[in-house]
Image (cartoon, rainbow, N blue to C red):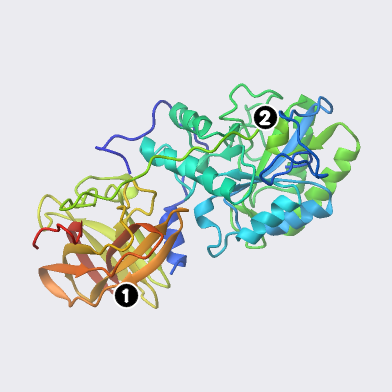
Amino acid sequence: MSSGGKDFAAGPVRTSRKRAGLWAATWVSVLVLLTGTATLLNGNQNSAGGSQPASATPSAAPLSSVSLTFDSGRASQMEAARILKDHGLRGTFYIDSGFVGAPDYMTMDNLHSLAADQNEIGGHTVTLADLTAVEPDEASRQICNDRVSLTNWGFKVTSFSYPFAASTAASENLVSGCGYSSARGLGEIHSPVDCPSCAAAETVRPANLFRTRATSEVGSTWTLAGLQATVEQGEKAGGWLQLTFYDIDNSGSPRSISPALFEQFATWLAARTAQGTMAVRTVHDVIGGVSKPVVNGPAAAPAAPGKNALRNPGLEIAGNYGLPQCWQVASYGKNSAVLSTLNPGHSGTVARRLDVSQYASGDAKLIPVLDLGACAPSVTAGHTYSLRTWYQSTAKTQFELYYRNKLGTWTYWTASPWFAPNTSYEHAIWQTPPVPAGAEAISFGLNLFSDGQLATDDYEMYDTVGAPSP
């Protein structure tokens, strides 16, 4: 996902948690804080319906603040929101706008319910992008367009959190330029599970508003005693403590805690605030400031007539995680897929082979990364496109297509007729139907929907107007 083999990372990468996997592949496989006075709906009104001051500033006392933050807009977090409301507390919820309405993620109604209860809605990029691994224009689209969508939906959006807690000085400047007032990292405050030499809390006035410090993500290894001790250490330090949650459920996964534990913690927090030595506040209430105008990220234009719209079409340039640059493996259903490299390819040095085994349902395919324009080719609604690749396969295959709308949401579109198995390279060519209204980009690839092996190389995509002859 870099340009010309150069990564976007400018300067040291600040990260405290490695990427757990390829987010887009997982998502496509499913496809088919906390008190305060400022309302989180767009518009300058407070919780009582009156006017909000031009610059909201945190209360001078108590000096100790706790912010409960939640990443990615997971549907399970609505249980945490219910518990917070029951105890008179509020949270900051960082949303990937491109996932809203997808399975396991919040709906638009959920977001408005959060805001109506005076929780804060913040940004987390459109599609959970690692801002240190993408080029500047893509990073700008991910940060800015997420805020544009959330603002257009009616929310006041001033706070941001970095996916995978990864940032550089360059990405921090982009967050500021997109109109945010602050951005949160992870893993830079002492907790019972890590960072023993770290500070007990962020300072009341953070040294870097665009890399504010928080504990590592609260997960299955955390206990009530650990949560309480972390709050108490922050209270003693007289600073600002940010805690971050992902799933609130009984799955037992590393990134989840049970609703029962969260209920116990919220009960304890509510009682603690009554003592008057600390308060639970949203991130916005701690940082203060007005909501700045939205800024759109740079547009990604469709390829000119006769020009191949795909980046790295020969799969020659290596990217991250053993994948070709600008390409990802996507799957759904029950099957096991492994991507390997073949030498030589149909042309050039390499081709890529997809092996599917233990097939029960769904499919697997190699496709351009589902992003906002760096890799996924932009299209014009109503136009048709010629898709081409060279392949050899032990099983029948077909082109499978997805499209992205202006909000950054990816949706299954259609599939081509089947192509027969071949033991030598054959040219697969197919013309798409007219691109649906509202679609701004597509992603496609040959798939396997059975056990088998599929090698591909030399991909092409042209607007059919001006497309070269095969």
Identified by mark 2, the residue type is: Gly
Vertical arrangement, residue 469 with respect to residue 3, above or below: below
Picture quadrant of residue 237: top right
Left or right: 46 in relation to 406: right
Circle 1 sits on which residue?
A: 449
Q: On the image, numbered disc 2 is attached to which residue?
A: 289
Q: Residue at x 30, y 51 (%)?
A: 323
Name which of mark 1 and mark 2 comes first in the sequence: 2
Q: Position of residue 207 (x, y in %)?
A: 61, 21
Q: Position of residue 224 (x, y in %)?
A: 76, 48
Residue 55, relative to residue 434: is it above or below?
above
User: Dividing the image into 4 quarters, which one contains the C terminus?
Assistant: bottom left
Q: How many marks?
A: 2
Task: Say few, some or many: other residues with alpha carbon within 10 Å of mark 1 (under 14 / 14 to 19 / 20 or more).
Answer: many
Q: Looking at numbered disc 1 in the image, what kind of residue is underneath it?
A: Phe
Q: Alpha carbon of mark 1 to alpha carbon of mark 2: how far?
A: 53 Å
- Element type at marker 1? loop
